[in-house]
Amino acid sequence: MRETGLQETRETDVIVIGGGTGGYSTALRAAALGLGVVLAERDLVGGTCLHRGCIPSKAMLHAAELVDGIAEARERWGVKATLESVDWPALTATRDDIVSRNHRGVEGHLAHAGVRVVRGSASLTDARSIRIDSGADAGARWTARRGVVLATGSRPRTLPGLEPDGARVVTSDDALFAPGLPGSVLVLGGGAIGVEYASLHRSMGAGVTLVEAADRLLPLEDADVSRYLTRGLKKRGIDVRTGARLEEAAVHEGGVRATLRTAKGEVRTVTAERLLVAVGRVPVTDGLGLAAAGLAADARGFVQPADWSRLETAVPGIHVVGDLLPPPSLGLAHASFAEGLLVAETLAGRAPRPVDYAAVPRVTYSSPQTASVGLTEAGARERGFDVEVNSMPLTAVAKGMVHGQGGVVKAVAEKGGGRLLGVHLVGPHVSEMIAESQLAVGWDAEATDVAQHVHPHPTLSEAVGEVMLSLAGRGLHQA
């Protein structure tokens, strides 16, 4: 320890600023490799994903699936079940219990691993040192022998003149915790978050209008995924409006009145009890002290790595993980885990493989779900690949008929029996089906490699097998 004139500075091997998925995965892996780790977190370890995003929202979406199942049981299967009501306090209590147990689990893992969690907002004082500016450990100072990892995450993007109030106007971070269930909701943003919240509210009985400025939902996904998803959402009664932008919105006692302008110049007014803004997220770097370490965020707020193979910035010893990273990083929790492992192993002197972002699955947990990995058909063609495409509706296999929710499997491969470039799924439970395709794309497999393996019958995964058989010239069923 050395004296600073204010408070002694303690030393450790690795300092991680931010305890979300990227931060705590870095800390746990670094500790497992024998490094001393200090993790600074100003709120709760687990970050947005655990406390305001992935986990509570998927808990609620599971409850929504149960609600939808009651309607299906009655209308399709002759099971005379009815939904009496949704006990909102009981539902949210179950959600909160799941979050709490996960939070205790993360805290326990960190303690067992020997990671020292420092409570408070941290800022860089130089390239290897931090100061805790507020919180329970305010005034503490630490320096790192190996390096500093920035993992401060992101927050919802807001719109000028449309400030969230937690009741009538909400962001994705506080939508789950807004008071009660609205009778109607206007969702701005047709990316994964907006689609999930639109699906959730519709299942719970709300009238839903879903607005996306691009010409289709999930604009970064394959066009066929967008088409099948939109069809499924509209079938459920969601009013999907693409190619439309918000011109203005006014909050009044009964809710929100919004004016939309379409790409054709048409102006429409939409009213709803609640407006949910899901137009993306922005990195959190305020108060981080980047300048003191010789760093600066780019115009979009991201901290650029100079070396993507190490996720290291232009300042040696400072690494970045999670939502602070620009594309091709995906802003997904599971990508953050992979980034944390990479950085921890780099700091431990190992030479891990870089994160293969093309092989990271992308999932939207709506009803219907979407799941994909690799290149879209358009993306593959733009990169100069001569591609072969094969698709099959899920209802072409018996289990798809059982579920009765439609959907599709689409594979994109190099023409002439080449490697798989992308696999795209829409339908029930496809989030649980994408792992097989993740391995195939990540290992540069060809359709023949997958086709030789037998898929269980009857399952939805048979549709993946059938698509691969067709690409391999051995198809039994054709769409």
Image: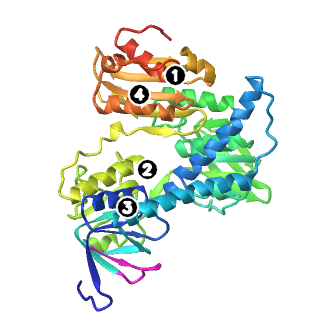
> Based on the displayed image, in which of its 4 quarters is residue 11 positioned?
bottom left
Task: Using the image, determine if residue 411 lies above or below residue 32.
Answer: above
Residue sitting at the far front? 112
Q: Is residue 35 magenta?
A: no
Residue 425 is labelled as none
Mark 3 vs mark 2, CA separation in Å: 12 Å
Mark 1 vs mark 4, CA separation in Å: 18 Å
Measured from the top left, where is residue 243 in percent x and y?
Answer: 57, 37
Image side of residue 108 versus residue 172, left or right? left
Measured from the top left, where is residue 214 in percent x and y?
Answer: 53, 39
| Amino acid at the residue labelled 1 | Thr
Residue 459 is labelled as 1
| Residue 233 appears in view | yes
Q: Which residue is mark 3?
A: 151
| Amino acid at the residue labelled 2 | Ala
Image side of residue 287 versus residue 457, left or right? left
Image side of residue 327 versus residue 191, left or right? left
Question: Mark 4 packing: few (<14 Cα in 10 Å), some, or many (20+)?
Answer: many
Task: Using the image, determine if residue 143 lies above or below residue 224.
Answer: below
Q: Nearer the viewer, mark 1 or mark 4?
A: 1
Question: Mark 2 packing: few (<14 Cα in 10 Å), some, or many (20+)?
Answer: some
| Amino acid at the residue labelled 4 | Val
Give the mark nearest the N terminus, 1 or 4: 4
Q: Which residue is mark 4?
A: 423
Residue 333 is labelled as 2
Task: Using the image, determine if residue 243 lies above or below residue 283.
Answer: above
Give the mark nearest the N terminus, 3 or 2: 3
Give the mark nearest the N terminus, 3 or 1: 3
| Amino acid at the residue labelled 3 | Ala
